[in-house]
């Protein structure tokens, strides 16, 4: 056990792409935690998807030993955090285990929406904030401007901001010196009963649930009988250790230390993130403050293209859930798509990542329906129905009113693009709240808008209309009543449930028209004419037609052509298999996402 | 084969496996490449090469003969390409040399594929004298501008001349036409159909223009220098062909083939009715039954379920290459062969019999095609409907799709 005065627990927080993971890599190198030859980029991002996309999804914790200028060796526990807005909950979990943060800001990009959101989270948690201006080696770097933005926009003194480059390694030592000097050491009672916070967990196929913990009071060692307070689960400690970044067992973890805890429990629901670990007998009576549970905001139907893969999909979702408590799902069946699951996600990136992992790691071929939000439908008889899927929306005749989730959206953008942002927000039913200049080059705008509008490619639009300059953050503010209707799409006269969606009534006509036009382009010509209709209840609001194909024939087929043409037919058939047949109409997968591609 | 006494073996004692009665010989040379063609061929370089091609082809043919097999007299011989007629006098030699190796049956059909620029009355009579009975002439369209766009190196007058020359030499003539060529009017198309028949063709093949990947035509379309074939015009062209050729006494007997009575291509019918055929030459494809495959060493001895083997020669097969350089060998089970027969049989107006359909296990698929109006079931046979001709792929893939 280490003297708590020689321990510093800190996180690195940043807007996505501001270089947080690279900086973490440099810390590992500088402290010789990882030999140079073992160094690979984004070492703490262990998932393939994280490395490929250059993003961090899961929080990671690592212990490094740092020989400071004062001649003492400090134990630094670094907790890497995701930078994307979808994963804000991971950030809040990590912060609960720390006394300070390094707030990384890109020297060229300056303060962005997630910088503001993360800084506020750190302030609310009363953490010491060390501003660090990263990527100072870039030609476009402008540290003075960025300092100004940090002071104006975040109200954080930035005179002594660390200037660093994750790429060259410059300033990394300065950053660690600042951590040692400024971040308070942990304070706890070594003689009190054990109190440790579970700030993350993952599932190991051999060891069961591995909890990442931060000891607040007391200590924990192998063989100890402990209790998970929220679930009242009592178990033996099989192993405690630290991550450097591989798991290294240690005898015990004491006040202020960060490490992992293995109990042999195999059921992740018994080891909840946010729970407190204490002694099984004479333990602590009060839990540490937990943090907000991750709440899924975006829902989509996931269906196996090949119906036989349904059980595999369920197994895969169960496996992913072990490491991703934010993932929730329930079975769903669709006339058009058969059996699948309605899956809840934190946001669109979370959805993409999960879908990609299901396809890549589990070899599944999936079809995703357009994302939706959770609507609250109040019926005339007075009760409320929770609607995760448009097809569950009650009949208009029985519907009194519908409420939908609203957000406070924060957009940071250069002044030149304020008009473009306002125009977009307006189209997406946004209500303007306020606007302030953070600096001469950055304006902060606040809007209130429905989540359902935000998940309709809002972010892509925002980026394209501001040449990539705008950044976005949002937080949930509650349910509000909206004039919503369910729009159905009929193909060849039959409603296709998986194409239904909920839309504001003022936009229903235009959306229906654009969607039918889009579907006309996407749905391949078939042997017969296919009418495409959009309808609200029994009322048809628009109609398009896919013309019938006139011919489909391989005319030339002699000795040398037979194998070749047979293979061509097999290939075409495989292509068709990737489509969903609804009635007799073959629908390509992209049709189910077409609603997202409809531009206002 | 010799018996112990080293003397005569009576046919009933001959245990050697008979080879197919159909032979395809590929001559992979052309005067130049047409814009739409994606078949393997090399540009012709002249007489020394021609002599070598003849020698090499015969060597390849002889190479098939092993102690386990014997030749059968040929019912049909088809020399295709490429453009066999670029060989000129060497083509006559080639036919002679081939028929010296394998004898022709008494009423054998011997077809030569010809292009107008390398065909003449002299060549026609020389071929006829060598036993050739039939010439298939690449005409494509009687529209000189369209022929230039397609990269053909002849005009319509030369095409008609070639048909007349063959006909006058006593050869049966088939003409190849392409419908749906952008810029060819309905009137010109009709004149093309009538023109080839008036010149003497008793067999016509009609193919829709298909844009194959990596052809000059595909490149020109991508560059905006040529237009895509129009689907409606192509369909009109196919329907006009059936109507006009029918009125001239040429009945459709396959998706793309029309003939006056008695002039159907027996060689091509062999392809569609599952009869084995040997093949020789770069890029050529052959097909043998299970017994022949084992005798030829094309199927492993321990595979007892082989019903059919398809094989092909590597392209670039010009003189100097090793013997029998096959680029693919595809083993098919008896069941797969039956399904393939059902699929190919449905290319023809005769269609397939109930027993063939039943044996191939495709009756259910055919019934679904009847529901969709693509197939009819009359007098114990399944055959395509008028609409079925336009949706052949749907028919073929549903029949073949049974295999999984």
Image (cartoon, helix red, strand yellow):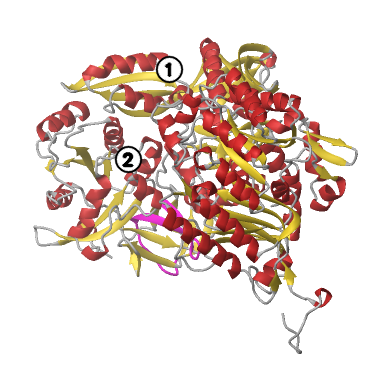
For the residue pair A568 and A317, the one nearer the viewer reads as: A568
Mark 2 residue element: loop
A207 within the magenta span: yes
Quarter occupied by the N terminus of chain A: bottom left
Residue under the image location 59 percent in, 62 percent down: B97
In the drawing, does residue A133 fall left or right of residue B116?
left
Q: Position of residue B61 (x, y in %)?
A: 59, 65
Q: Earlier in the sequence, mark 2 or mark 1?
A: 2
In the drawing, does residue A251 fall left or right of residue B142?
left
Residue under the image location 49 percent in, 26 percent down: B144
Indicate whether A252 appears above or below A10. Answer: below
Residue under the image location 55 percent in, 33 percent down: B159
Q: Position of residue A281 (x, y in %)?
A: 48, 61
Which residue position holds label 1? A428
Identify the main secondary structure in magenta: strand
Give the chain of mark 1.
A
**Chain part drawn in magenta:** A200-224
Please tell me if label 2 and label 1 are on a single chain. yes
Which residue position holds label 2? A83
Mark 2–mark 1 distance (CA, rounded to whole Å): 25 Å
Residue under the image location 65 percent in, 68 percent down: B299
Which quarter of the figure has residue B69? bottom right
Mark 1 residue element: loop
Residue A371 is at least partly visible in this image = no
Q: Position of residue B59 (x, y in %)?
A: 55, 67
Indicate whether A232 appears above or below B196. Answer: below
């Amino acid at each position: 056990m280490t003297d708590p005065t020689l321990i510093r627990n800190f996180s690195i927080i940043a807007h996505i792409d501001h270089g947080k993971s690279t900086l973490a890599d440099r810390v590992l190198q500088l402290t010789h935690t990882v030999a140079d030859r073992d160094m690979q980029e984004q070492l703490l991002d262990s998932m393939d998807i994280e490395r490929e996309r250059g993003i961090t999804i899961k929080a990671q914790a690592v212990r490094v030993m740092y020989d400071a200028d004062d001649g003492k060796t400090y134990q630094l526990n670094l907790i890497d955090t995701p930078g994307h807005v979808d994963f804000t909950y991971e950030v809040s979990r990590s912060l609960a285990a720390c006394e300070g943060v390094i707030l990384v800001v890109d020297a060229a990009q300056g303060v962005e929406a997630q910088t503001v959101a993360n800084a506020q989270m750190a302030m609310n948690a009363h953490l010491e904030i060390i501003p660090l201006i990263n990527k100072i080696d870039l030609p476009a770097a402008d540290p003075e401007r960025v300092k100004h933005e940090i002071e104006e926009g975040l109200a954080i003194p930035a005179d002594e901001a660390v200037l660093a480059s994750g790429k060259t390694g410059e300033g990394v030592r300065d950053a660690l010196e600042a951590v040692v000097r400024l971040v308070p050491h942990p304070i706890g009672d070594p003689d009190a009963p054990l109190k440790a916070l579970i700030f993350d967990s993952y599932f190991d196929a051999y060891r069961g649930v591995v909890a990442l913990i931060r000891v607040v009071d007391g200590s924990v060692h192998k063989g100890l009988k402990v209790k998970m307070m929220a679930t009242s689960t009592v178990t033996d400690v099989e192993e405690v250790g630290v991550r450097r970044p591989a798991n290294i067992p240690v005898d015990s973890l004491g006040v202020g230390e960060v490490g992992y805890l293995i109990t042999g429990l195999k059921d992740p629901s018994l080891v909840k993130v946010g729970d407190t670990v204490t002694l099984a007998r004479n333990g602590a009576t009060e839990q540490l403050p937990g943090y907000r549970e991750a709440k899924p905001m975006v829902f989509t139907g996931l269906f196996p293209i090949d119906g036989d893969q349904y059980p595999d999909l369920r197994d895969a979702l169960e496996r992913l859930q072990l490491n991703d408590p934010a993932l929730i799902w329930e079975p769903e069946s669709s006339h058009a798509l058969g059996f699948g699951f309605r899956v809840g996600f934190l946001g669109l990136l979370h959805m993409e990542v999960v879908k990609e992992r299901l396809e890549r790691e589990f070899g599944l071929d999936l079809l995703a329906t357009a994302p939706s939000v959770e609507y609250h439908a109040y019926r005339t008889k007075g009760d409320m129905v929770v609607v995760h899927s448009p097809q569950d929306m009650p009949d208009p005749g029985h519907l009194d009113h519908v409420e939908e989730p609203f957000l406070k959206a924060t957009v940071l953008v250069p002044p030149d693009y304020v008009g473009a942002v306002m125009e977009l927000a307006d189209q997406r039913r946004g209500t303007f709240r306020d606007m302030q200049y953070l600096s001469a080059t950055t304006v902060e705008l606040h809007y209130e808008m429905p989540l359902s509008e935000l998940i309709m490619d809002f972010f892509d639009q925002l980026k394209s209309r501001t040449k990539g300059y705008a950044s976005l953050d949002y937080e949930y503010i509650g349910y509000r009543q909206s004039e919503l209707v369910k729009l159905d799409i009929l193909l060849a006269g039959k409603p296709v449930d998986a194409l239904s969606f909920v839309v504001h009534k003022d936009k229903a006509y235009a959306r229906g028209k654009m969607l039918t036009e889009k579907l006309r382009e996407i749905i391949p010509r078939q042997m017969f004419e296919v009418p495409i209709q959009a309808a609200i209840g029994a009322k048809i609001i628009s109609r398009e037609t896919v013309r019938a194909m006139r011919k489909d024939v391989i005319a030339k087929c002699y000795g040398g052509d037979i194998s070749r043409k047979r293979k061509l037919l097999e290939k075409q058939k495989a292509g068709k298999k990737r489509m969903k047949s609804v009635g007799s109409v073959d629908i390509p997968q992209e049709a189910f996402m077409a609603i997202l591609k409809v531009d206002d | 084969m010799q018996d112990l006494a080293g003397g005569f073996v009576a046919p009933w004692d001959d245990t050697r496996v008979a080879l197919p009665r159909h032979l395809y010989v590929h001559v992979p040379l052309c005067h130049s490449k047409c814009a739409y063609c994606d078949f393997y061929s090399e540009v012709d370089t002249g007489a020394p090469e021609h002599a070598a091609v003849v020698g090499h082809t015969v060597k390849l043919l002889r190479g098939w003969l092993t102690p386990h097999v014997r030749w059968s007299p040929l019912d049909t011989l088809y020399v295709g390409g490429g453009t066999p007629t670029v060989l000129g006098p060497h083509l006559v030699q080639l036919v002679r040399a081939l028929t010296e190796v394998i004898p022709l049956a008494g009423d054998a059909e011997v077809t030569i594929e010809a292009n107008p620029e390398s065909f003449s009355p002299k060549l026609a009579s020389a071929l006829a004298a060598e036993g050739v009975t039939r010439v298939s002439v690449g005409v494509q369209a009687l529209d000189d501008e369209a022929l230039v766009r397609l990269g053909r190196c002849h005009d319509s007058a030369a095409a008609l001349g070639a048909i007349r020359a063959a006909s006058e030499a006593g050869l049966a003539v088939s003409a190849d036409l392409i419908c749906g060529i952008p810029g060819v009017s309905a009137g010109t198309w009709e004149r093309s159909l009538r023109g080839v028949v008036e010149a003497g063709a008793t067999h016509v093949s009609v193919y829709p223009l298909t844009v194959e990947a990596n052809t000059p035509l595909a490149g020109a379309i991508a560059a905006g220098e040529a237009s895509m074939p129009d689907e409606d015009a192509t369909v009109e062209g196919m329907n006009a062909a059936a109507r006009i050729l029918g009125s001239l006494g040429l009945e459709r007997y396959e998706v793309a083939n029309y003939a006056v009575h008695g002039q159907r291509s027996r060689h091509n019918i062999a392809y569609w009715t599952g009869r084995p055929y040997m093949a020789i030459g770069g890029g050529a494809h052959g097909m043998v039954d299970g017994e022949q495959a084992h005798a030829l060493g094309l199927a492993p001895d321990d595979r007892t379920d082989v019903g059919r083997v398809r094989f092909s020669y590597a392209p670039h097969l010009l003189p100097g290459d090793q013997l029998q350089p096959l680029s693919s060998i595809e083993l098919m089970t008896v069941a797969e062969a039956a399904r393939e027969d059902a699929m190919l049989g449905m290319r023809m107006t005769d269609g397939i019999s109930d027993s063939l359909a039943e044996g191939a296990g495709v009756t259910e698929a055919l019934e679904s095609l009847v529901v969709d109006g693509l197939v009819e079931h009359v007098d114990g046979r399944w055959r395509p409907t008028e609409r079925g001709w336009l949706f052949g792929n749907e028919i073929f893939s549903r029949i073949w799709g049974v295999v999984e």
